[in-house]
Image: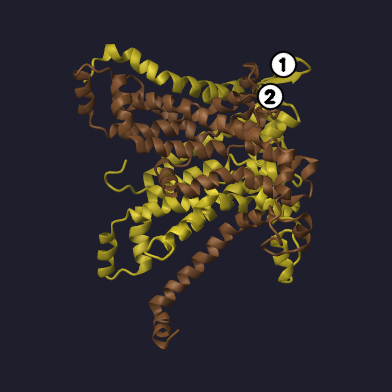
Chain colours: A brown, B yellow
Amino acid sequence: MDILRMKQMFRPKTLQTLLYHGVLIFCAFLIVFPFLWMLTSAFKTQSEIFHDIKFFPRAFHLDSFREVLSIIPFDKYFINTVKFVFGLLFVQFFTITFAAYAFARFRFPLKDLLFTLLLLQLMIAPQTLVVPNYIIIKNLKLLDTVTAISLPYVASAMGVFLLRQAFRSIPAEMEEAAVMDGASIEYYLFKIAIPLVKPSYTAFALVSINFHWNEFFWPLIVTDTVKSRVLTVGLAMFAESSESAAAWNDLMAATLLVAAPLVLLFLVFQKAFVESFMTTGLKA
Amino acid sequence: MRKRSKNRLRIFLYLLPTFFFLFFFTYFPYLSSFIDSFAERRGNLISFVGLKNYERMAFDSVFHTVLWNNFLYSILTVPLTMLFALGLALLLNRKIAGSAFYRTAFFYPTVIPMAAASMIWLYLFLPTYGIINRFITLWGGKSVEWVGDPQYAMISIVIVGIWKYVGYYMMIFLTALQAIPKSLLESAYLDGAGPVRRFGSIVLPMISSTSFFILIIAVINSFQAVDQVYLMTRGGPGNATNLMVYYIYQNAFSFWNFQYASTLTVFLVTLLLLITLFFFKVVEPRVYYESGET
């Protein structure tokens, strides 16, 4: 490095930038390290876990993955999770679209009260109502089904709120013109309005997928067997089982398998993900 | 305006699916818990016992501990997460090389399931062999039984809570910071306002509606935290990390007392509604909104 560059480096402005990066890298390290440590540990052997503190494994063993996949019915959990998450998203598409359109475009009695009642749902998470909802699901004879997991999430206050805003941004004249031309409101809604607010739907979809893929406590309560368990619950079952006792490499491999699908999705569609979360708030 | 009579049926049908599910899986459960809270089960008989469950709750020392724990969990996670989030957002709110990398690095825990996060941290917190304890002993400290020690167990689940949400809140703060008009800050600068003054008089008021939004979400979430309790500590050791939802779960599914669990559910939901009411009636009027925002 020549003298000129060195001088530049130690100008106050540059020093400040360096300090910024120092702090940021330190924080990034704290937040990223747990994931990386899990990642590399999944490829270690049992003895490396307990006797080495090297970051990288001596060789990238796949034994723990083989072990985990032979014990956990991962494919079944994966299919259940996909059924739950995407089946729910499909149903939510209709429930939120109609409710949002009604709140955006129609006038009716008790509108404000109904909207407030809807928004209150944002404050009460499904895990809080596990006891009464478990009884309801039991009475419906739906225990241990993917449907049971989905039911409390079908009505989505967040989705209705988000789409109501979106529909309100479309000029009312467009709808009037379409209806004047003899189109039904439903035709207008599905052919014109929904395509116009596609970004809002994408945002909702990504947040809904993320939220439900990660959901744990309610699925844990209503599922009993491999038939309906989702990935997060499967992970917990594995962690509790004797097979995983002290086998932290296996447990980290299982954790990686559960977290990987969304992390990959996130890394590929990063921008869309972040923007979705910004427009929607926390819940789906 | 639209012909109303023609649309009445349409509006009803449009709202029906959402309100049907909202009623049966949000409002009805609350009501049915309320009814169950006045009952008791003896063998196969369920009988009305008046306020007995509430009386029990009032004198249940475990419940008091749980309530205190949850309060502690909120007091520890909410301000710390928000402060770190705002700090990181301020650091990233400038032209800086690698800002996309930093954003990804801070935000990614949002997409990690809490169940997976709990496993990862359990592994990091492992007594003796965990990487955190290895570092502590390397620097001459004494190995800590993170989740096994009543003194540290709460801190452990708090750390996981902060780690999971700090990036998400950071991103919301960052969006709010970037919406502040540059001209406002520039003119303040030209008028001789220093960084502290600019932060206090411009930045803070301009992000106060965002802060309010994050605050209410964070508080509400902290009173419903359960995943990491179930997976990392099972409420222990000796109820040191037992939080509201976990205690409800224990009463229903370990002690099989659904009526008492219902009573606790009524308490928690009512508490959440009161917190919400408090925020919107007492805190929100003090929040500064830019004109145009509603």
Camera-side residue of B91 and B111: B111
Camera-side residue of A113 and A188: A188
Kindly identify the amino acid type of the residue bearing the numbered disc 1. Ile
Kindly identify the amino acid type of the residue bearing the numbered disc 2. Gln
Give left or right: position of B48 versus B289.
right
Rounded to the nearest angstrom, the CA distance separating label 1 from label 2 is 9 Å
- Residue B243, percent across and down? 65, 41
Residue identifier under label 1: B46
Vertical placement of B256 versus B201: above or below? above
Give left or right: position of A5 versus B151.
left
Residue at the outermost bottom position: A3
Vertical placement of B259 versus B282: above or below? above
Camera-side residue of B82 and A214: A214
- Residue B162, percent across and down? 57, 52
Give the residue drawn at x 52%, y 51%. Answer: B108
Vertical placement of B128 versus A109: above or below? below
Give left or right: position of A217 versus B276.
right
Same-chain status of marks 1 and 2: yes
- Could you tell me which secondary element the residue under label 2 belongs to? helix
- Could you tell me which secondary element the residue under label 1 belongs to? strand
Label 1 marks a residue whose chain is B
Callout 1–callout 2 Cβ contact below 8 Å: yes
Label 2 marks a residue whose chain is B
Give the residue drawn at x 37%, y 37%. Answer: A200
Any part of residue B54 in sight = no
Camera-side residue of A190 and A120: A190
Residue identifier under label 2: B259
Quarter of the N terminus of chain A within the rendering? bottom left
Residue A213 sits in which quadrant?
A: top right
Sort mark 2 into few (<14), some (14-19) or many (20+) by Cα contacts within 10 Å: many
Vertical placement of A236 versus B170: above or below? above
Lower sequence index among marks 1 and 2: 1
